[in-house]
Amino acid sequence: MNDKTLYKLEFHKVKELVKAYAITEDGKMKINQLMPKTTLPEVKMLQGETGEALLMSVKKGRLPLSSLKPVAPILKRVEIGAVLSGGELLVVRDTLRMTRKAKNYYQDAIGNGEVYTVIGPYFESLSPQNQVEREISRCLVSPEEVADDATPELSRIRRQKLSLGNRIKESLQQIIRSSHYQDMIQDPVVTLRQDRYCIPVKVEYKSQFKGIVHDQSATGATVFIEPMTVVEIGNELKGLETKEQEEIEKILTELTNMVVPYTEDITRSYKELVELDVIFARSEFSLRYDCREPKLNDKGYIELKRARHPLLPKEQVVPIDVRLGKDFTTLLITGPNTGGKTVTLKTLGLFSLMAAVGLQIPAAEGSEVAVFDGIYADLGDEQSIEQSLSTFSAHMTNIVSILEDMSLNSLILLDELGSGTDPIEGAALAMSILEHLRKQQIRTVATTHYSELKLYALSTEGVENASCEFDVKSLRPTYRLLIGVPGKSNAFAISMKLGLPEYLIDDAKVYLEKENVKMEDILVDLEQSKRMAEVESERAQAFRAEAERLKEEIQKERSKIDKAKKKIMERAELKAKELLKEAEEEADRALKEVRAAARKAQVIIDEHGLQAAKQGMNDTLTKQRKRASKLAGKSQVKVLASVTVGEEVMVTSLMQKGIVTKEADKNGMVEVRMGIMPMKVKLADLQKVQEETTPAPSKTNKNKQKGQISYNMRKTQNISTEVDVRGLMVDEAWPVVDKYLDDAYLSGLKQVTIIHGKGTGALRTAIMQRLKRHPHVEAQRPGTFGEGEMGVTVVTIK
């Protein structure tokens, strides 16, 4: 890839955008030096770095880096034995601080089990030296200042200096305030001359004022004298300053010696920080420009979806879809000037360059980019007076250079191929160059206005037409790229719109060759067909969406019908069970009456009396079966020839469902479990029921059924452990509850549940009040979580 191509594709401007997100000076310099990689593994590695940095930034925020000065020259001075200054030590300290923060940032990022296989090694190579960092920070306040408490000796020296300074100032203030010296002193101030405290004295009193002259004013009227009373103290202060400087040199030497063992670690850490700075700058660019990681290949396939040129304003740029390399290797773009042809060329080339340096591209998910050995572009007008180059010559010079340098895995971008010369010769040359590139399967994108090239693309395999759409009504390009449709120059339409007389346009059409007229007609037909196809496609999508909506509504209605059918079947089955239980209860009542009569008469029921009782019970069962058969009249039954263990059957003699526990024996007897009691019945008395949907009960009947079901279920020895009185008034519900509690007491149940619902709480309160006075109730409580909570009351039976 040559520098001219990179410049023509404006790659340097993209690097400037990325550089704005780098923190370190060396990071910015490294971005300036970015060059596209030419192998697929290298590019995949770079894209992986950007992707992981982007993920880490989204989850944990930006990498905590601040501006870092280059540390390599400083560490080289350490290696040759030099003592570092305070400023140089602070640069080392800043590098160590950023190393520690970056390491902690990474440790926090992987703390939740996240794995960063690509950029992880950069963080792992960082070597924080916390002790060195802390010691430099403790000892140095600024590049020119060492902290007082850096060492005990320095602290002692500075305290002595402060004390001596105060003594000197007090002595000088006494002299200034003294009336004896008022006439001698030029100004009542204390000043420093040659690091000595002096008083400005008038020159005529120079001999009378005892002290050492250190300076004189420019006019000569004032001399600066250090009084003899403070000379000795000043000398002592000067000695302390010398000791202070010696102690500072000692501190800097010790700090430098602390750095010496870690020069290699610090150098490596700094390099890794710069690399991370560049990587995170790429990820920040992706965030700001809404970029996506492209799929990569080395087969020359390019497919960009909703691609946006990064140098154009996001709110103005029109996204384009473009593909190359799979169905065709050469794409020929036609259309009017300023229609977006050159922008399409630049977008293709620039996106390939961006991907090759690890930058994500501003396009939709699923876009694909190829990794090329070289990208070559001939764009713009490069005529040169100095080099005696015309437009055509400049283009041909570039094309010759491209043909010499390109490889089979190259991307060639040619703008206005064959222009700048005779149209017939230019078109012939353009077709020759394109055919040469096509035969070698080199990925090529070219723009042109020549109709001959449009026909060449229509008739040549591996070459595809494309056009940049133009709205003749508004005289504006839409910037949409239409692949498969050749473009029109629109010269006649634009001229008529601008006011050129129609007769001139008609005369111009006469001069066109018949082939050209025919070609224009073909283009018009193709464009109209394309538009019609788009309209039909949109209508088809709308019809499909409507069909999906109707399908969803039908499925919902069908689901409602299935649920209603299931409820109706459950109600019918429950009603049949109630009738059967009533029959059993009446039979039990008959037996109890017979036994009661026998006890009163104190006689034993003879065989005749027992048979009469059984006959009464059978009569009662017969009546109840007839009632049950009326309810189940709409059901269809199947007589079973055989049964299997676990099969659900209907025992017709008892009108009750059961589960087969043993198959039929040689006498045709089958063991069936109904409830908790197994019993043997004849195979002929077993049937399989297939129930049909019965009409849903009205709301009034539903409320009656609810109370009646709860009431009837109390009349069996297999009494339910709960009663449901929801929907009933207090006066309607209490008789049901009262009778249920009697039956539960007689059946020996120890705990039952009364379902009254939540509602306003009136029914619950009334039932709980009456339960307190009920003779069978030992205790009561509201339901807990899972039992129904405040919608039920759990009762313990005495």
Image: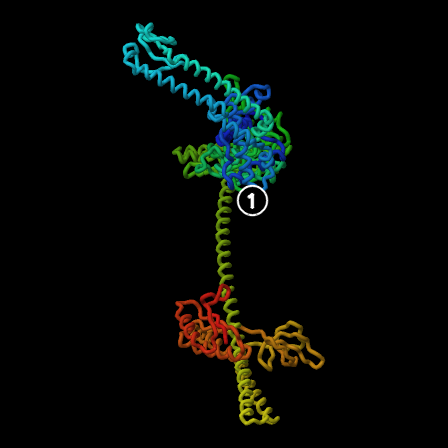
Vertical position of residue 737 compared to residue 284: above or below: below
Residue behind mark 1: 112
Nearer to us in this view, 696 or 91:
91
User: Which residue lies at the image location 57% right of the left edge and 26% below the top edge?
Assistant: 258
Q: Where is residue 21? Give x, y as percent.
A: 49, 32
User: Which residue lies at the image location 49% right of the left edge and 49% below the top edge?
Assistant: 538
Nearer to us in this view, 676 or 163:
163
Circle 1: residue type:
Asn
**Residue 680 lies in what quarter of the image?**
bottom right
Residue 7 visible from this viewpoint: no
Looking at the rendered structure, the secondary structure element under dot 1 is: loop
Q: Where is residue 256? Give x, y as percent.
A: 55, 23
User: Which residue lies at the image location 32% right of the left edge and 16% below the top edge?
Assistant: 174
Vertical position of residue 658 compared to residue 433: above or below: below
**Placement of the N terminus among the 4 image quadrants:** top right
Vertical position of residue 136 compared to residue 360: above or below: above
Nearer to us in this view, 394 or 499:
394
